Image: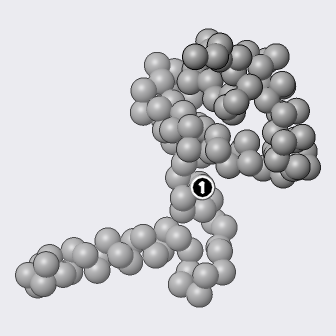
Amino acid sequence: MADDDGHDRVYNPTSYADWDVEQALADAVSSHVLLNQSYEEQTRRHLEQSAPAAAMSIVQIALYSHDERRKLDASKYIVDRMLGKIGEEKDHGKGSPLESLLGEVVQYAEDLTRGAL
């Protein structure tokens, strides 16, 4: 079996401690050459691949941080991204996301009361 020099796979560290800047840069250059991607396309690909881990990181901070300010900031960020900032109307034809959520909750409660669920 040949020695694994790491150049046949995309560098994907599982933790900050595993991060190797030289390996990440070498893989970025390899991806640029081998996949014939522009640096912009490559950047988008890296961001898309990292988005789930980044989102989970924000959720972990919101739920488990020992710093209450960080928990609040992460929680506000999640709510703002999911429902929109309070006072900002988004033009979806249904009103604000908060109004939509409230409407769904009220409808669900009414359905429960009528025994429809």
On screen, residue 79 above or below 55: below
| Quadrant of residue 51 within the rendered picture | top right
Q: Residue at x 90, y 45 (%)?
A: 39
Q: How is the image coloured?
A: one colour
Q: Quadrant of the C terminus?
A: bottom left
Count all numbered tags in the image, as a single digit.
Answer: 1
Residue 71 in view (yes/no): no
**Which one is nearer the viewer's eye here, 87 or 105?**
105
Which quarter of the figure has residue 105?
A: bottom left
On-image quarter of the N terminus: top right
Secondary structure found at label 1: helix
Judging depth in this view, the residue of 64 and 24 nearest the camera is 24
Q: Nearer the viewer, residue 67 or 5?
A: 5
Give the residue displayed 64% in from the left and 16% down from the top: 2
Question: What amino acid is found at the position of numbered circle 1 in the picture?
Answer: Arg
Q: Residue at x 73, y 42 (%)?
A: 46
Question: Within 10 Å of the Cα at label 1, are there few (<14), some (14-19), or many (20+) other Cα atoms?
Answer: few
Picture layout, residue 53 above or below residue 23: below
Horizontal and vertical percent position of residue 78: 54, 48
Res 48 visible: yes
**Location of residue 112 in the rendering, given as x and y in whole percent from the top left corner:** 14, 76
Residue 116 placement: quadrant? bottom left
Which residue appears farthest toward the bottom when viewing the image? 93
Q: Is residue 112 above or below residue 44?
A: below
Residue of label 1: 81
Seen in the picture, residue 97 relative to 74 is either above or below; the reply is: below
Residue 65 placed where, x, y %? 48, 24
Q: Nearer the viewer, residue 86 or 37?
A: 37
Q: Residue furthest left?
A: 115
- Counting from the top left corner in percent of width and height, residue 24 is at 77, 25
